[in-house]
Image (spheres, grey):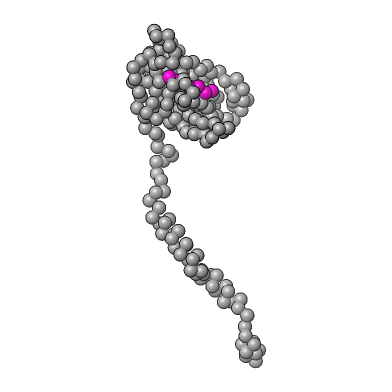
Amino acid sequence: MTWRMREDEAVVLVGTTPPSASYVSFDLTMVKGSLHTGPVVWPAVGDPVDSATIHTNGSDPYNRPFALVITGHERTRAKVHEMLAASAPGGAISDLTIPPALFHLGIGKDADQLPLGIRINAPKPGFEKAVDTYRATPPLSLLRVPPKRPSGDPTKPEYPPAPLPVPPLRVSGTGATELSLNPTYRTLRRRIKAGTKTGAKSEPEARSKSETKPQSKSETQSGSK
């Protein structure tokens, strides 16, 4: 699924979440460029909405009705939330933000293209066939939700700018890094490089060569007496 969108539009994904699996996510990215004409830029737009963060009305996030609102406009998001809250799926609404400060929104050829991918990793035992069916025929609908167009020009925004801010990224894993080990790593690297340049041998290597050194003739004769 991929599209371009005006800054005051929203794209809404509605349907049912995948069956039970170790990990499920909805990943929004941006693609610009072409493999045929030059380099391709393909970054993530932000954190994915995954099985740990998606909003559903059940005790778990699998096989549940949901809606995913994708927009970069504050007023549009509020309007879409109002419409969804008045119908199904109620509180099962999640958001993916496209920050206009980071991405070029619009429907022209120069605007950023936005693919949405779905990841389903390692189906839980007994759900393998259900996941295969979901992948083959996903029970999802993708809806473009523009504001009403009094001007009748689909290329021009109808709402004044109301950009959503760049959302903070979630801390990956435990949040702990190995950055504190960097000084030790640099010292070790410097010593290894210095040893390589001077031809210094390690103690085991030097001992091994001395033990295998051939004896002189005099040493052999004295040892045989």
Is residue 55 toward the left or the right of residue 18 in the image? Answer: left
Q: Residue furthest bottom?
A: 225
Given residues 11 and 102, the one toward you in this image is 102
Q: Is residue 55 above or below residue 185?
A: above
Residue 133 coordinates in the image, percent (x, y): 61, 22
**Residue at left offset 37%, top offset 20%:** 73
All told, the count of numbered labels is: 0
Dividing the picture into quarters, in which one does residue 224 lie?
A: bottom right
Task: Tell me which segment is drawn in magenta.
Answer: 1-6
Residue pictured at 43% horizontal, 11% vertical: 153
**Location of residue 215 in the rendering, given as x and y in whole percent from the top left corner:** 62, 83
Query: Is residue 28 a member of the stretch shown in magenta?
Result: no
Identify which residue is drawn at 40% across, 12% down: 147
Front in this rendered view, residue 64 or 83 = 83
User: Which secondary structure is most common in the magenta stretch?
Assistant: loop
Is residue 179 in view from this perspective?
yes
Q: Let me know if residue 95 appears in the view.
A: no
